[in-house]
Image: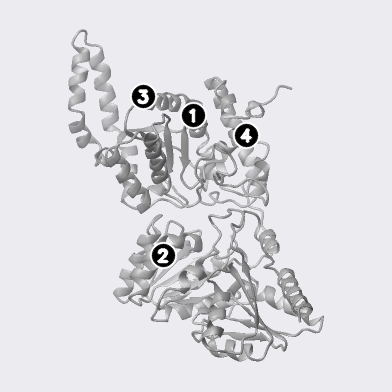
Amino acid sequence: MEKRILEKINSPQDLKKLSINELAQLAKEIREFIIDVVSKTGGHLASNLGAVELTLALHYVFDFRKDRIVWDVGHQTYTHKIITGRREKFPTLRQYGGISGFPRREESPYDHFNTGHSSTSISAALGMAAARDYKKENHYVVAVIGDGSMTAGLALEGLNQAGYLGKNLILILNDNEMSISPNVGAISRYLHQIITGQVYNKLKEDIKTLLGFIPVFGEQMIRFAHSIEEAVKRIFVPGMLFEELGFKYIGPVKGHNLPQLIEVLNEIKKIEGPILLHITTKKGKGYPPAEKSPTLFHGASPFVIKDGTFIKKKDAPPTYTKVFGETITELAAKDKNIICITAAMPEGTGLNKFAEKFPDRFFDVGIAEQHGITFAAGLACEGLKPVAAIYSTFLQRALDEVLHDVCLMDLPVTIAMDRAGIVGDDGPTHHGLYDLSYLRSLPNIIIMAPKDENELKHMLYTAIETPHPVAIRYPRGEAVGVPLDPECKLLPIGRGEILREGKELAIFAIGHMVYPSLEAAERLSKEGIEAFVVNARFVKPLDEELISQLASKVTLVVTVEENSLLGGFGSAICELLADTNVREPRILRIGVPDEIIPHGSQHILRHRLGLDGEGIYRRISKFLKETEKNK
């Protein structure tokens, strides 16, 4: 049997040997391959199915051994990976030790820039173009950005500078009218108007065709017609935003039409200056379940290919995300001042049901975390109770706003940080490992982390009723499975709780690390070592009285956190003991080391880092043995 075309593609150079018809067949085979692999590994399915033809056309026209390409976010790079020598490794997608779900410079010479957060492509590509010109080199630089990413301030800043500098830069706007959830905002509406308002493009082509038939004077009349093009554009095209910013705008072009894409890209190579090519694609293209529900298949878990049903554990506990969404909706039903904000993630943060029930109290600001936080600050200034639900990794983008616009004014803004700690398969750009460190130094802020889903309910209520900035961090995925109290109650600010009595040592754990710490204590008990286990609840303010009291009783204090050890929870306890002159016990800090944590399942990564019950037990046991040996 003759090999499939895909099996012959080991590099983009193999791609260039194919005819257009063979490219179309290859696109079909790649879709089937992506669906098959992602159904087993999970991953970003819908966005990748929508970018197959675009990727093939780009590699067919350009040579990215010398040309440069920057993919925004990287959600749509699976085809890019498959045709750049990683086809055989593709089944290891997002698995521990396998290939990343995002572009990684260390993974391939065809990955020119690491991405994972949105809206970086224009700035990075412009930097590459400026470096090219400075070094007097000659190659193309291409940035591929989704329409959702264009809502972010960084993208607009890059767009502004690129238009001003006027360097040769090709910006491809992949417009599928969705980022993760349906796009919001004026820019999204503007792009939709361009797509639906094709009067100008059709009129221009019709006039050009007609004038071309007029002998002798036809070409002169075409040149004359071009001179009034700008005036015509302003009549028929809303705003011409991109051209006003200094870009030559081309489009919209159908992003699944390979011959047209290749033709347009070849023509674009001849044009000087910054160019914006606007293409339209369909998210989930070629797989009906993903076309029908692109949001569900954005970051898909393993599924059954036949009908698109997701494979889930039976009788699994609810996710922390679900508990948050249901709790905030219940609280909002009793308190009309609660307002919820998300940055393009209503489903991902669990706020979709809140949005349905209270549409006038829900704001999706798009991929604009900085704006979302300052927007929340404005709401708080007027006596409302804003709750901003933002993934830990994405809140990093709004650190200045949290400090300047919330903390310095001591405003009652609640920040719900989903996906804190080890996130798993999405890897380094998505782990929420730094929030305790980057928030702890800010004035006025209160930082909490629940040990389980029931405590999350109480913390959320406590945060909303507290007249200060509050951040609550909770992990991705399933909660513990404890019963939920019917009513929320206020927790005393800065108070921890002793879950287990001990003698020789005290384990202070925060958030998701509480139950593994209890497991470790039980294992130590079997060896005759009795450990206090404290659910700290608060990273700021710490329970100074409880920590000082226990530290003066034991010979070893252990801190456990799913956060960077640099400046985190353990550091806070060390500082407290030093500042209060408590009889200094030995201290063992367990957490995430100062290294980049790769992608892989949460279970595997926690085990590797010693952040499960067994790992915590082994770390403490080893420390005790080494201490005893050195006496």
Identify the image quadrant of the N terminus.
Answer: top right
* Residue 599 coordinates in the image, percent (x, y): 62, 53
- Going from N to C along the chain, the mark reached first, 3 or 1, is 1
Disc 3 from disc 1: Cα separation: 16 Å
Q: Which mark is residue 270?
A: 3
Q: Name the amino acid, label 1.
A: Ala
Secondary structure at numbered mark 2: helix
Query: Of all residues shown, which one is farthest toward the top?
Result: 216
Question: Which residue is located at x 70 percent, y 84 percent?
Answer: 505
Farthest-out residue, right: 527
Q: Nearer the viewer, residue 611 or 385?
A: 611
Task: From the image, tell me which residue sits under label 4.
Answer: 85
**Residues under labels 4 and 1: Cα distance?**
17 Å
Q: Is residue 470 above or below residue 342?
A: below
| In the foreground, 497 or 252 | 497
Tell which tag, 3 or 1, sits nearer the viewer.
3
- Mark 1 or 2, closer to the camera: 2
| Residue 93 horizontal side relative to residue 129, left or right | right
N-term-proximal mark, 3 vs 4: 4
Instruction: Provide the residue designation for mark 1.
Output: 57
Q: Are marks 4 and 1 in contact (CB under 8 Å)?
A: no
Viewer-closest of 564 and 296: 564
Packing grade of label 4 (10 A; few <14, some 14-19, many >=20) is some
Q: Is residue 304 visible?
A: no
User: Left or right: where does residue 528 sit relative to residue 405?
Assistant: right
- Judged from the image, the secondary structure of the residue bearing numbered disc 4 is helix
First-in-chain label (1 vs 2): 1
The span from disc 2 to disc 3 (Cα, nearest Å) is 42 Å
